[in-house]
Amino acid sequence: MILLIRYGAYPMIAGGAFALLIDLAGAGIAYWPTFPLIVLAGIAAVAVLERVAPYEPDWNRDHEGDTRVDLLHLIVSYMLIQFAVILLFGLRAWRPEWASVWPERWPMWAQVALAGLIMDLGLYAMHRASHASGLLWRLHAIHHSPQRLYWLNGGRRHPLSALVLAGPGLLALMALGATPVAVGAWLSFMSIHLAFQHANLDYRLGPLRHLLGVAEMHRWHHKRDFEDAQVNFGEVLLIWDRLFGTFYDAARSPGRGDVGLRDDAVPRSYLGQLLWPLKTAPDRRAE
């Protein structure tokens, strides 16, 4: 059972969901409520598997009420994703056909892949910018503040940081006239992937870890020492890290006591985390 989870969890759950989402999108199935239900099932599966095969048993324990706070973050983050999809569908309704350069005649899998590449490149660029200095880092630091990594961490983002990260990619897709259901399929897959990316789950992806930002690679990005965390920025794909020199791999990724922030001043409450970046002077450690 443990071996099946270790080597089969991501291909079966994330890979299976990706194939299903593309198939449903190509068949013309309505986005709501089917796609969000698939996301819910995928994330729930990750949460359950963490209890069966944890990477760090201690990371399954609530740390100072962080589970409740992280759940609120996840709900707000997912609501923002749904708002983006609604906006895409709304824009599609009044956009004249001549104003769109999106390859609508492509197979749905190709449209989803193209949407994913555009979205992921924008996320990579803004993710690196968020580590550079100033207010962007303060907003993003909330995501790095937990001292454990588990399924809820993927959604632990300040709403303004989420908008900064996803904004350029979404704006590019809107400007191109992207098929909303194709973008929705990618965002749905990405939501499941983010649960895996931060999962406290002992799973492996073999050589594919060099392509996909799964947990064994992404834990390096959450290293406690800020200088060591400037690697593996890719949200889903690591090809950008390969291209721009931020890729890192090693035999065993960080564990208990290795992640979080060195000088953690981030409040523990949800409201406190929303207000903290706006009240505090920019942290210059990234310069």
Image: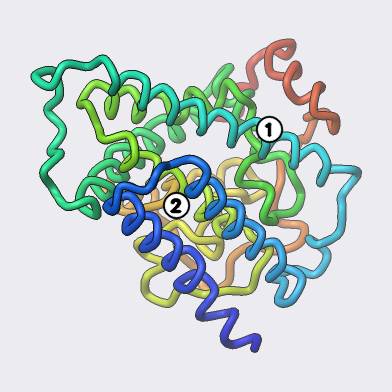
Disc tally is 2
Q: Is residue 16 above or below residue 133?
A: below
Q: Which quarter shows the N terminus?
A: bottom right
Category of crowding for the residue at label 2, using alpha-carbon neighbours closer than 10 angstroms: few (below 14), some (14–19), many (at least 20):
many
The residue tagged 1 is 142
Is 98 on the left-hand or right-hand side of 254? left
Residue that appears at 71% across and 46% down: 260
> What residue type is disc 1 on?
Ile
Is 103 on the left-hand or right-hand side of 62? left
Where does the image place residue 250, in percent across and percent down from the top left?
Answer: 49, 68
SS type, badge 2: helix
Where does the image place residue 168, in percent across and percent down from the top left?
Answer: 35, 25
Q: Nearer the viewer, residue 18 or 270?
A: 18
Q: Is residue 145 above or below residue 202?
A: above
Is 21 on the left-hand or right-hand side of 252? left
> What residue type is disc 2 on?
Phe
Q: Is residue 121 above or below residue 231?
A: above
Residue that appears at 45% across and 52% down: 189
Q: CA–CA distance between discs 1 and 2?
A: 23 Å
Q: Nearer the viewer, residue 89 or 7?
A: 89
Is 62 on the left-hand or right-hand side of 266? right
Q: Nearer the viewer, residue 170 or 158?
A: 170
SS type, badge 1: helix
Residue that appears at 34% across and 30% down: 169
Category of crowding for the residue at label 1, using alpha-carbon neighbours closer than 10 angstroms: few (below 14), some (14–19), many (at least 20):
many
Chain-order first, disc 1 or disc 2: 1
Where does the image place residue 119, in percent across and percent down from the top left?
Answer: 34, 37
Residue 189 disc label: 2
Residue that appears at 69% across and 18% down: 277
Residue 114 disc label: none
